[in-house]
Amino acid sequence: MLRIPANGYKPQRDYVKKEPRLVRCDVCGAEFKAKRVDARACSGRCRKVRHLRLLGQLPGPKPVHQVTCEICLAEFESRRQDARTCSPRCRKALSRSSLGHLDRLERVVKSLDKAQARKERKTLDEISRNFARHFGPPMDYGQKTEFAFIRRNRQWKARMKHLKNVLEAIERSA
């Protein structure tokens, strides 16, 4: 039944709010109240999984690794390949033991090596800065000027040569 309001807008049909119905989720099997007629998943996550399954793009489950705990020596399954402990309790025990300290020592040594390399780079930068401060800026490619100390040395040699020529001329005339 169509009703035409006073403003002239004509709706396509009357929308009657329906009661939610109980539906079983296609992915996890949980029952949920569906507000839409075409609802097939209980949550956004299940909806995404269902969509990926329909497209054939759903990745397989993560591989499970059999690992032995380093503290209690119990075998356990882990999704992480580098897992070392089976529980938070063993993880804390490992971090407080000397076994856990060995890994930290390796990391500390690496970071100290990096710090030493940074310090050496810093001293090299300081040396080049002092060189540039004392002798002038270095020449760039295509630059037609020379180092300041080379220019001063060349000018000094030219003055000495001129002075020598003047002295020889005076000796010859005398």
Image (tube, grey):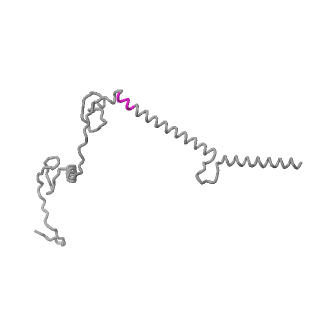
Q: Residue furthest right?
A: 174
Residue 69 at x, y = what percent? 28, 30
Most foreground residue, 150 or 40 = 150
| Secondary structure mostly taken by the magenta-highlighted segment of the chain | helix
Q: Quadrant of residue 105?
A: top left
Q: Is residue 36 above or below residue 65?
A: below
- Left or right: 154 in relation to 93: right
- Left or right: 70 in relation to 129: left
Q: Answer whether residue 148 is magenta in the image.
A: no
Residue 103 at x, y = what percent? 37, 32
Work out which quarter of the rendered image holds the N terminus and state it: bottom left
Residue 85 at x, y = what percent? 28, 32
Query: Residue at horizontal 60%, vertical 42%?
Result: 130
Query: Residue at horizontal 42%, vertical 33%?
Result: 108
Query: Residue at horizontal 49%, vertical 38%?
Result: 117
Which range of residues does the magenta coloring cover?
A: 99-104
Residue 14 at x, y = what percent? 13, 65
- Left or right: 17 in relation to 142: left
Q: Is residue 145 above or below residue 123?
A: below
Most foreground residue, 95 or 165 = 165
Most foreground residue, 56 or 32 = 56
Number of marks drawn: 0
Most foreground residue, 152 or 58 = 58
